Amino acid sequence: MLFRRKSSPPTRRQRMSEDPAEAKKPATFSYAGNSPRQPGASQPDAKGEKLGHFWLARVGLLIFLVAVTASAVNVLSLAPQATVLPLSGSQDKSFLRPTATYEAAADKLLTGSIWNHTKVTLDTGNLSQQMLKQFPELTDVSITVPLLAHRPLFYIEPAQPSLLLATPQGSYVLDTSGRALLKVGASSQLPDGLPVLTDQSGLTVDLNRQALSSAYVKFIQIVVAELAAKQYKTSNLVLPAGSSELDAHLAGQPYFVKFNLQDTDPRGEAGTFLATIASLKKQNVTPSQYVDVRVPGRAYYK
């Protein structure tokens, strides 16, 4: 009896190897995103794009900073031309010089230093002192820096003139304290009705210094006002040489009136004159040379 060896079924590994077609079959499913980059295909340069955005942002920032800086420089800059205005409350006081004279002096001071070209570095205090020193007729100078405009504002206040002192060296404007404010020139602007005092006593006059005592100035002002109140206008006042006398010449009258400047009662002397001349008029008497009221309570005429 013959026995045949029973053949064993092929294993799984053997069956797979025996099907070559199935082994060579490509995969039917894949993701396009996972496909490998093909040689020569153009792709965006991410690094160059980021670099471009970087420099574009930097250029924009630079332009903005330049614009801001230019605006700041423009706002803070000052022109070397000043505008001169009367100080608040002094509009009723007239300037003794043309406004253009003060503006020209202010412009010269502004151009004298580079620090005066900006609102931040402008030394207003120093400029005020220099203006006061140059123009003794000013009692105050206030400088304002405008917020948006470029011309600094110089507010000036003139002193109150009281007399015009005429001397052989020239005529000078005095303030109420007797200080010489200004030597009169062709461009001077004098207020109307300023009393004229002619000096024959040899006074020494220096600008911004005392030329006449304040007591004398006050005496003269009171006498002039008392006479004007009774329609007697003084045409000229004279300080004779070698005395403390004041000779008041009256407009339209052939005589003058002698006052004593050292007297402390100018109203009393003026009242004595007015009473004397009223009495003489009743007698149809007119003095031909003078009326002397230098002695308190008495009057002499010639």
Image (cartoon, rainbow, N blue to C red):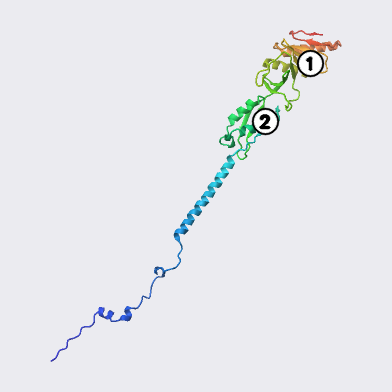
Camera-nearest residue between 52 and 158? 52
- From the viewer's perspective, is 23 left or right of 58? left
Q: Quadrant of residue 201?
A: top right
Q: Nearer the viewer, mark 1 or mark 2?
A: 2
Residue 210 at x, y = what percent? Answer: 66, 18
What residue sits 31% from the left and 81% below the top?
A: 20
Q: Quadrant of the N terminus?
A: bottom left
Q: Circle 2 is placed at which residue position?
A: 102
Q: Quadrant of residue 222?
A: top right
Q: Which amino acid does the dot numbered 2 rest on? A: Tyr
Q: Secondary structure at mark 1?
A: strand
Q: Does residue 235 show up?
A: yes
Residue 282 at x, y = what percent? Answer: 85, 11
> Looking at the picture, does residue 288 appear above or below residue 209?
above
Q: Circle 1 is placed at which residue position?
A: 249
Camera-nearest residue between 18 and 30? 18
Badge 1, how many Cα within 10 Å: few under 14, some, many 20+? many
Q: Quadrant of residue 195?
A: top right
